[in-house]
Amino acid sequence: MCGIIGIVSTTPVADRLVDGLRRMEYRGYDSAGVCTVHEGELVRRRAEGKLANLVAALAADPAPGTVGIAHTRWATHGAPTARNAHPHATEHLALVHNGIIENYKELRAELNGEGRVLESETDTEVVAHLLSREVERGASPETAIQTVLPRLRGAFALAVAFRSRPDMLIGARLGSPLVLGHGDGEMFLGSDALALAPLTQRISYLEEGDWVVLTRDGADIRDAGGAPVEREIVTSGATAAAVEKGNYRHYMQKEIFEQPTVVAQTLGSYIRQADATVALPQLDVDLSTVKRITMVACGTSFYAAMIAKYWFETFARVPVDLDVASEFRYRDPVLERGGLSLFISQSGETADTLAALRHCKAAGQTIGVIVNVPTSTMAREADILLPTHAGPEIGVASTKAFTCQLAVLAALATHLAVRRGLMSRAEEQDVVAHLLEAPASLNAALKLDGAIEAIAPLVAPARDVLYLGRGPDYPLALEGALKLKEISYIHAEGYASGEMKHGPIALIDDRVPVIVLAPSGPLFEKTVSNMEEVRARGGKVILISDEEGVRQAGDGALATVCMPRVHPLIAPLVYAVPVQLLAYHVAVAKGTDVDQPRNLAKSVTVE
Ligand code: F6R
């Protein structure tokens, strides 16, 4: 949700700022802007829409200067127009912001009451004016920031450039991430290490309430009370190459095809191949006594949790409470002290999930986090950190992070079952053997790319699409519907197959494709019955099953996708592939923006 970057250097910064924004476009792409300090002036360029528009604006009217800040926006307050684009500026300073200033209305009223005119509809601009007011009263930038920060409620990562100070920037964070990059005779600020990847690998993570004065020679970091603090310099693993598209047309396509590799990498750190056992990394908490697990996540990560509930309950016989994070906190959940709460997130920054995590921590829960960004806020606040090794996921629609989450969750469920004495050595070895089959099965599923591309034209013209599944294929049906709607803008719903007759069947007619996810197995016959109910009403079925399933039930389907035969444990990972590929090819057929679908952002850092 918005990306910010700042550079203090001795050479021009505009191009590097824009390059940093390019790496953060996944955080939002409603508008973009740059402001440099040059010859005693603030040089500001802003443009509505994608970064390409800002690049064009800069080409027509460059922004010279060796100090600057920049922003890519996901609109929260105010339409995505150039006027609402950051940086927001006054006569004295310019500022970029990621987060939300919750008390902006009262601050705006106060400023208006003094005759100050704010030009945008954003929550951010009040911060620029509050700081400016302090500067006008004679305060130094440092004093101004110290006076203003305590007045802000909500979440923010800020970078501020001052007209009179071409030698420095100020950064501050509370609730939104901000990293400091250490260069050679230059310093950087960014929303994440990825933004700074080509500039430096030497990173410090600012802590909650920190603010920092950045000069070419270094950083003076202060905590919320103004006391000088040190923040460790770590080497960021983020590489510029990891965020290139390679030979693929879209990031999403590349990330779908990376799944065999990244799932293998992820499993590699949870499985000890020598004795075929599950071995969780750095686990110094005894999970054998866990009586109940609370799982909280959003979107695709929530569907991974839904699938895992089947595994935790079947293997480990531990009851699982599940919630989407935005609902969880506000329903006053019952949390027994000492229970385990598990949070699943690709970014590790999703505001709702983070707020739920902190709520559980305050309630005395042990905090487990399955996260793809190991330096994220959630990772740093976890008692048990279970990383996925999917690598940077740039496509807004989550794909490889999902299958890696499933791999970790399957390993964790197995670990719990063993620790609770419910799984014998032989059974554990059997489970491990099936998990290790996943990368090869994912590869086999990817070979169906051409077949799925051929089916896409059957779905692309539809206004509505239904996805059906039973057991763990039900959450996968929800995930399929989410993928399709977010990148192709086709209305899609996922249902538990057995629920059809309780209402949704009324939607069926010959214009509604119904995607049935049904690997052969104990639930297959029942799903086939539901499929027949759809067909009897003229519904157009696309069956995704294995050879046995297609042989038994493929007749009369509009199309079939014949998947490799896989063990039920890994079926949700493997069946994720056709679901992702179908959404991808439908979106390509419709000509939508696959990697940057409208209204979305990758990292949702606002509630
Ligand atoms: C869908 C998608 C979103 C995310 C959700 C949670 O393709 O990507 O639904 O899954 O915003 O994000 P994380 O996992 O970063 O907490």
Image (cartoon, helix red, strand yellow):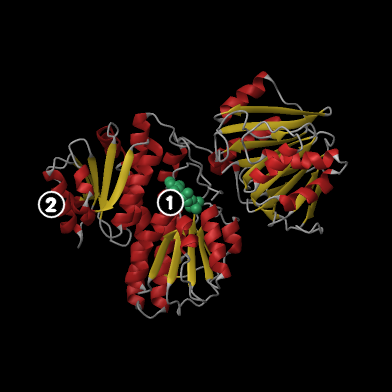
Say if disc 1 is inside 8 Å of ligand 1: yes
Q: Quadrant of the N terminus?
A: top right
Mark pair 2, 1: CA separation:
34 Å
Q: Around disc 1, counting alpha carbons within 10 Å, would you say few (fewer than 14), some (14 to 19), or many (20 or more)?
A: some
Q: Nearer the viewer, residue 122 or 412?
A: 122
Q: Around disc 2, counting alpha carbons within 10 Å, would you say few (fewer than 14), some (14 to 19), or many (20 or more)?
A: some
Residue drawn at x 83%, y 27% as measured from the top left: 39
Residue 278 pos. (x, y %): 43, 70
Mark nearer the viewer, 2 or 1: 1
Image: 576 above or below 472: above
Q: Nearer the viewer, residue 52 or 11?
A: 52
Image: 340 above or below 137: below
Q: Which residue is mark 1?
A: 299
Q: Nearer the viewer, residue 547 or 15?
A: 15
Q: Quadrant of residue 119?
A: top right
> Contact (CB < 8 A) between labels 2 and 1?
no
| Three-letter amino acid code of the residue under disc 1 | Gly
Q: Residue furthest top?
A: 60
- Going from the N terminus, do you reach mark 2 or mark 1 first? 1
Q: Quadrant of residue 306?
A: bottom left
Q: Which residue is mark 2?
A: 552
Name the element at disc 1. helix
Classify residue 393 as left or right of residue 559.
right
Image: 425 above or below 384: below
Inspect this view and state whether residue 310 appears: yes
| Three-letter amino acid code of the residue under disc 2 | Gln
Name the element at disc 2. helix
Which numbered circle lies on residue 225?
Answer: none
